[in-house]
Amino acid sequence: MSIKEQLMADMKEAMKAKDDGKLALNVIRMARAHIKQAEIDSGHADFDDDQVLAILRKEMKQRKETLAEIENSGRDDLVAETKAEMSVLEKYLPPEMSEDDIRAVVKDVIQSLGAEQKNMGSAMKAVMAKLKGQADGKVINQIVRELLS
C-alpha cells in the first residue's frame, strides 16, 4: 500500500472515530492538500512514495520549527497540539537514523573524498545524497563541521 493510499485509509478511520479522530483527520487532510497542491504545481498527475515522503518531511520540519518558537511562549495548549500533530505525521515517515549511525556514514564519506574535496560543501553534498531523507540536515551539518575541523 502506498503512502497516499494509507493516508486515505487513515482519513476514513479518523472520520469514523468522530471527535476522537478530529486532530488526526485535520492533519491528514492538510497533508493530502499539500500533496495535491504539489502535484498540481509540478504538472505530475500522481506522486510516488519518495515525493510524498518529501512533502511529509517538510510538514514535520515546519511543525518542529513551530514547536521551537512556541515552547518559550508559555502556551502549553499550542505545544501539546503541535506535538500531537507531529505524532500523527510520524506514522508515515521512516524512522530517522541515530546520531551514531549518521556519524559513521559521514566518516566514511569524508574518507572517500579526495584531499581537494575535503571541504564543507563537497562533504555536505555527498552525505546528503547518501542519506537522502533518512536524517535531519541540521544534525548532518553539525557532524560534518565537527569532523572536518
Image (cartoon, grey):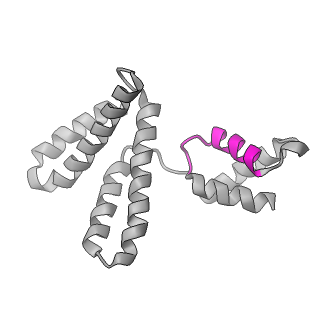
Q: Report the side of 13 relative to 74 (left or right).
A: left
Q: Residue at x 90, y 45 (%)?
A: 115
Q: Is residue 127 magenta?
A: yes
The answer, for residue 100, to whether it is visible in the render is no
Q: Report the side of 69 relative to 30 (left or right).
A: right
The answer, for residue 142, to whether it is visible in the render is yes
Q: Which quadrant of the view contains residue 131?
A: top right
Magenta stretch: dominant secondary structure: helix
Q: Is residue 134 above or below residue 50?
A: below
Q: Quadrant of the C terminus?
A: bottom right
Q: Is residue 98 above or below residue 121?
A: below
Q: Residue at x 28, y 68 (%)?
A: 78
Extreme residue toward the right, this view: 115
Residue 70 % position (x, y)? 36, 70
Q: Residue at x 56, y 50 (%)?
A: 135
Residue 20 % position (x, y)? 14, 56
Stretch of the chain drawn in magenta: 120-135
